[in-house]
Amino acid sequence: MKSVKFLLLALAALELASPMMATEITIPVTGTAAFVTGIDTWSFTYTTGAPGVYLQSITVDLSPTDVLFNTAPGGFGAYTGTYEDVTPLLGSGTTTGLSSVTPSGAALDGGNKVTFAFNDFTVGDTFTFSAGVAGPAPNLLLLQDCSSLTGIAKVACLAANALKTTENAAAILAAETVLPSQVANADITFNFGGPDIVPGTVTDPLSTAFLSGASTSVQAPEPATMAMMGAAGLALLLSRLRKRA
């Protein structure tokens, strides 16, 4: 009789150790995203969401566009002579708990993807950053060597070079002036999660980013936790049975 009781109790303890499935629910989240021309500034606001659901990371992917990041001297933006590394603005890196920017600087220069990770990006928060972007390098006109020329020929050569210089300057300005329409198709990925939430993801073009819902899961106790609970229960039952025996 004791052995049957022991077997039933042991099976009950092992049942506790079996993993529990998380219930899948939809968490609606909304926000806004924007890019400002001239100062190459990006802004993301987490407008609405469920309590305890944090915005854990944002990835900006420019690969669907014809522009790239220009974040270090030389390199990709050498033809413009200007660049700007990734820089959080308005204290938003602090308020959102920005923990990492990957990659940045020379590692990002000429690239098309950057990811920001956060520890405390909650509903109502805004993250703003600047980062240089530029269009494809323009085909600049080559200037003539006028040094060996004289008279009218030299005047004509210098005039032609002046015109080419003006055209080159205009081409460079156009390349480094990125309009919102040029980055409208950039993919923006938002990853959500929290202490009791299995991460969920939303990916949208910048032009409509953050206006759809993220599917996340309420997290049941982890399988490893349940196994520990079951093992502890089994050990306790064995101890009590041995004492009674």
Image: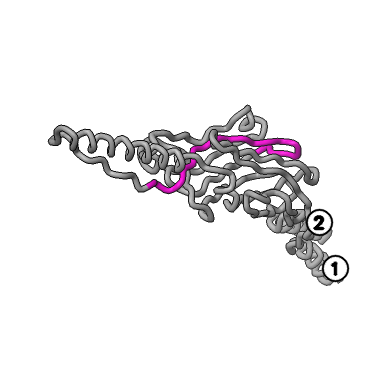
Q: Is mark 2 on a helix, strand or loop?
A: helix
Q: Which residue is drawn at 68% across and 52% down?
A: 199
Mark 2 residue type: Arg
Q: Disc 1 designates what residue?
A: 5
Q: Determine the CA span between mark 1 and mark 2.
A: 12 Å
> Which of these two is toward me, 216 or 229?
216
Instruction: Give the farthest residue toward the front.
Output: 152
- Ranked by sequence position, the earlier of labels 1 and 2 is 1
**Residue 141 appears in view:** yes
- 132 lies left or right of 233: left
Q: Disc 2 designates what residue?
A: 240
Q: In this view, does 90 lie above or below 168?
A: above
Q: What stretch is highlighted in magenta?
A: 119-138
Mark 1 residue type: Lys
Q: Which residue is drawn at 73% across and 50% down?
A: 211
Q: Position of residue 227 (x, y in %)?
A: 71, 58
> Which of these two is toward me, 78 or 116?
78
Q: In which quarter of the image is residue 120?
A: top right
Assess whether residue 127 is covered by the magenta stretch.
Answer: yes
Q: Quadrant of the N terminus?
A: bottom right
- 148 lies left or right of 15: left
Q: Answer whether labels 1 and 2 touch (C-beta < 8 Å).
A: no
**Mark 2, other Cα within 10 Å: few <14 / some 14–19 / many ≥20:** few
Assess whether residue 117 is covered by the magenta stretch.
Answer: no
Q: Position of residue 64 (x, y in %)?
A: 53, 55
Main SS of the magenta segment? loop
